[in-house]
Amino acid sequence: WIDDPSGRLPHDYDSAGMGGNRFSTILLYMSDLDEDAGGETVFTEAWPVGQQENDRVKLPEALKALRESNAAEGILERGSWEEEMVAKCRSRLAVRPRAGRAVLFYSQLPNGEPDPASLHGGCPVLKGDK
């Protein structure tokens, strides 16, 4: 919020129907989850930092690996959005919960347009509690 008593500074808070005008978000994790327990925050349009393009796992491959691992057996319905989300959690940029860890990300590009890489979601918990 910028206070401008003079009313001379231009302000544009309209998001033009493209979502909110949130500039940034910080997530603070309050609990720990093991590596294969799920519960990560996944950025579905972003790849892990430093991962080479030829090392990227496509969604069909990630789904196949998830099904072969039996990690979601009896928990998630085959073909459900939750199963697809877990596959993305294992192939895209994901942050595993650790007590005291914080994640800061920006929702807008410097020019004010929404940043597609900020699209995120919560991965289903497969073991334990989040």
Image (cartoon, rainbow, N blue to C red):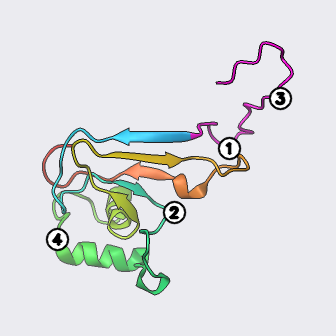
Looking at the image, residue 66 sits to the left or right of residue 108; the answer is left
The disc, 1 or 4, on the residue closer to the chain's N-terminal end is: 1
Residue receiving disc 2: 45
Q: How many other residues sit within 10 Å of disc 2, few (<14), some (14-19) or many (≥20)?
A: some
Viewer-nearest of labels 1 and 3?
A: 3
User: Residue 83 at what x, y percent from top left?
Assistant: 32, 62
Distance from label 2 to label 3 (Cα)?
32 Å
Q: Which residue is mark 4?
A: 70
Query: CA separation, marks 1 and 4?
Result: 38 Å
For residue 103, above or below residue 6: below
Q: Which quadrant does the N terminus fall into?
A: top right
Q: Quadrant of residue 76?
A: bottom left
- For marks 2 and 1, give the CA distance: 17 Å
User: What residue appears at the point 51 percent right and 53 percent down from the top-left corner?
Assistant: 119
Sequence-wise, the earlier of marks 2 and 4 is 2
Of the residues shown, which amino acid type is indicated by label 4?
Answer: Asn
> Is-magenta flag for residue 5?
yes
Q: Nearer the viewer, residue 90 or 109?
A: 109
For the residue pair 63 and 78, the one nearer the viewer reads as 63
Amino acid type indicated by mark 2 = Glu
In the image, which disc is placed on residue 84?
none
How far apart, in angstroms, are the residues tagged by discs 2 and 4? 25 Å
Name the residue tied to disc 1: 18
Q: Secondary structure at mark 2?
A: loop
Amino acid type at image mark 1:
Met
Q: Which residue is mark 3?
A: 10
Q: Amino acid at mark 3?
A: Pro
